[in-house]
Amino acid sequence: MPVRNEENHIRGAVQSVLTNGYPLESLELIAIDGQSDDRTREILVEIGQGTAITVLDNPARIVPTAMNIGLAQARGEIIFRLDGHAKYLPGYMRRVVDFLQSHPEVACAGGALRTMGENPVGLAITAAQTSPFGVGDSRFRLAGFTGEVDTVAFGGYRREVFERIGGFDEELVRNQDDELNHRLRKAGMKVWMLGDISSIYVARGSYAKLWRQYFQYGFWKIRTMQKLGHVPTLRSVVPGVFTFSLMLTFLALPIVHWPLLALVSCYSLFLLFGWFHGRRQSIVLRSQKLLAVAIMHLSYGMGFWAGILRFMFGWKKIEIQTSLSR
């Protein structure tokens, strides 16, 4: 568990592991704390009394270094990752372990990611992150699918995966799971999604935090694509194309107006379809959901182009890398 400043959620995350139904004598839980300045560490120590919880330090304060610190400590045959603001639903771990033991050709397995909001904005963000109009064909966010996928959230990996292809890329503050799973599949191994189990992820509680989250996704996607040597999925570049088109139409305004009007009209029509896609949702929730969708697309797209300037053109004046890594 890579954690930092998760005092509001860490207790529920740990309990979801300890009460998941997996034999405690066959389980170790390792929390890697990125120098939390709230009560996260204190709560972990409190829960750990009488329980097999190991708490380690992560001075770098980013997820990939936390994962590699944990991997060096872990002794398990199958290794799960769970964030401090997420939970496993009962039976998740046993189902994954049983599946991996009966399917030796699969290296990693996990279930759907169910997003949960804790306030009205969080509920709107949840609706956006579970809608195909918000996340495209991202299967691990859309429940009900069983089969081979490019990635899963909070899955279980065979230990030999890391012995064979190495650990997490510590340069990638975001998207490190995508890069690892790409290496896994390139090595001839499979990632599998199980449609009958789920984990829960607590969504951001404000639009500002959502903007920052997706800006980071777009920014680090460029470095990830550089390392992969190709574009992993179409959905990973669509927001960048949209944002670039929007910028071009704004620049053309002194000369011609119709390209901007056409682009805004098409995107408005897209959002209208998203509105009708949530017919069972209240009018207020649907309106807030569309705002969240637009924020996700625009912030990701802007981060995408900031990443191009920083990583592809080496524009050193963009001092985003350091701030985003913390």
Image: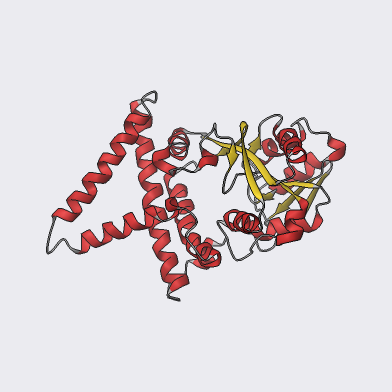
* Residue 284 occupies quadrant: top left
Outermost top residue: 280
Percent x, y of residue 141: 52, 39
Please tell me which residue is depicted at 77% across the width and 59% down the height of the picture: 163
The front one of 48 and 298 is 298
> Is 100 situated left or right of 224 in this image?
right
- Return the x and y of residue 312 as percentages of the image width and height: 45, 72
Q: Residue sitting at 70 percent across and 56 percent down?
A: 67
Q: Quadrant of residue 132?
A: top left
Q: Going by the image, does 121 lie left or right of 243?
A: right
Identify the residue shown where x is 75% and y is 34%: 94
Residue at 38%, 53% in the rendered image? 238
Looking at the rendered image, the quarter that the C terminus falls into is bottom right
Determine if residue 136 is in view: yes
Figure disc tally? 0
Is 241 or 229 nearer to us in this picture?
229
x and y percentages locating residue 217 in the rendered image: 49, 55
- In the rendered image of this protein, does residue 313 appear above or below residue 105? below
Identify the coloring: secondary structure
Relative image position of residue 48 (x, y in whole percent): 81, 42
Q: Is residue 129 above or below residue 30?
A: above
Q: Is residue 57 visible?
A: no
- Judged left or right of residue 250, residue 17 is right
